[in-house]
């Protein structure tokens, strides 16, 4: 009987967590602000407790719903009233600008010089003389603006207009032909079979991944190894 209760509460925990996650929306970890990060940890902890709580599963379930509701309410509040974002999410902090490192802002961001240099190196900047501005975003991510003479050269700098790039279309995945994608690019299975033979393959089952690039009219194949 107890095993059945565990199975039931576990399924209830998974369903509740799935529903709350869907309602809260999708965010990458790097895009989470401080409250979202803490809420995510807490919600996960409560969901784990719900999975093993046999006597009063309604208590962690209610707590789970409250945390989810508060998170959704704050997201709605910041969406409807942009001025509240600086109080709830925080604001970007300029750590360096035009050769000056702002010590007060480093202290405000709870960073010392070693951590500041580490974050710059992680972004690929080992020489601060190449940097114009460094900003610590509200989600903890570092934004770096290099000096004009140190930034990578762009085609526009050389008055070159490259052709527009297009995303490839997956035609074969794990040895299976993606029929809908094949139709979307205006091709059929006979064309695919011909392309396979031209590249020395007999069947689609021999291919791990096949991507079609319309710009070059080319099928790129990665065989199973």
Image: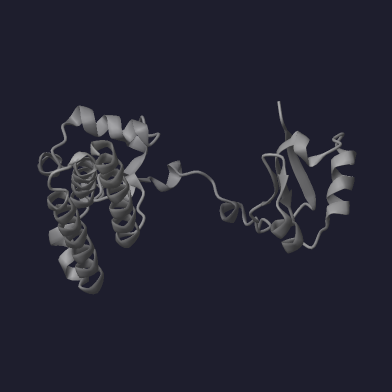
Location of residue 86 with respect to 171 vertically, above or below? below
Of the pair 181 and 53, the residue shown nearer to us = 53
Of the pair 177 and 62, the residue shown nearer to us = 62
Of the pair 96 and 67, the residue shown nearer to us = 67
Please name the colour scheme applied to the rendered image: one colour
Is residue 90 in sight in this rendering? Answer: no
Q: Is residue 118 left or right of residue 186?
A: left
Quarter of the rendering occupied by the N terminus: top left
Q: Is residue 27 left or right of residue 192?
A: left
Residue projecting furthest to the front:
1
Residue drawn at x 19%, y 63% as measured from the top left: 74
Q: Is residue 34 left or right of residue 211?
A: left
Residue 50 rendering spot, x and y as whole percentages: 20, 45
Residue 220 rendering spot, x and y as whole percentages: 75, 42
Residue 27 rendering spot, x and y as whole percentages: 35, 53
Of the pair 152 and 39, the residue shown nearer to us = 39
Residue 216 rendering spot, x and y as whole percentages: 77, 52
């Amino acid at each position: 009987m107890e095993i059945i209760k565990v199975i039931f509460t576990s399924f209830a925990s998974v369903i509740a967590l799935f529903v709350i996650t869907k309602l809260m929306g999708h965010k990458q970890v790097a895009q989470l602000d401080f409250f979202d990060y803490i809420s995510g940890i807490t919600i996960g902890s409560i969901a784990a407790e719900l999975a093993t709580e046999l006597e009063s599963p309604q208590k962690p379930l209610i707590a789970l719903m409250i945390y989810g509701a508060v998170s959704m309410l704050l997201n709605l509040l910041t969406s409807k009233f942009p001025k509240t974002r600086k109080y709830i999410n925080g604001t970007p902090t300029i750590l360096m600008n035009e050769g000056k490192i702002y010590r007060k802002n480093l202290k405000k961001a709870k960073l010392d010089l070693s951590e500041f240099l580490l974050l710059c190196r992680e972004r690929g900047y080992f020489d601060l003389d190449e940097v114009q501005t460094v900003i610590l975003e509200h989600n903890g991510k570092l934004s770096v603006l290099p000096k004009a003479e140190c930034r990578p050269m762009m085609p526009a700098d050389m008055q070159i207009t490259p052709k527009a790039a297009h995303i490839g279309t997956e035609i074969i995945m794990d040895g299976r032909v993606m029929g809908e994608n094949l139709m979307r690019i205006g091709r059929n299975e006979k064309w695919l079979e011909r392309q396979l033979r031209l590249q020395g393959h007999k069947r689609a089952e021999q291919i791990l991944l096949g991507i079609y690039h319309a710009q070059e009219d080319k099928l790129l194949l990665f065989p199973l190894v």
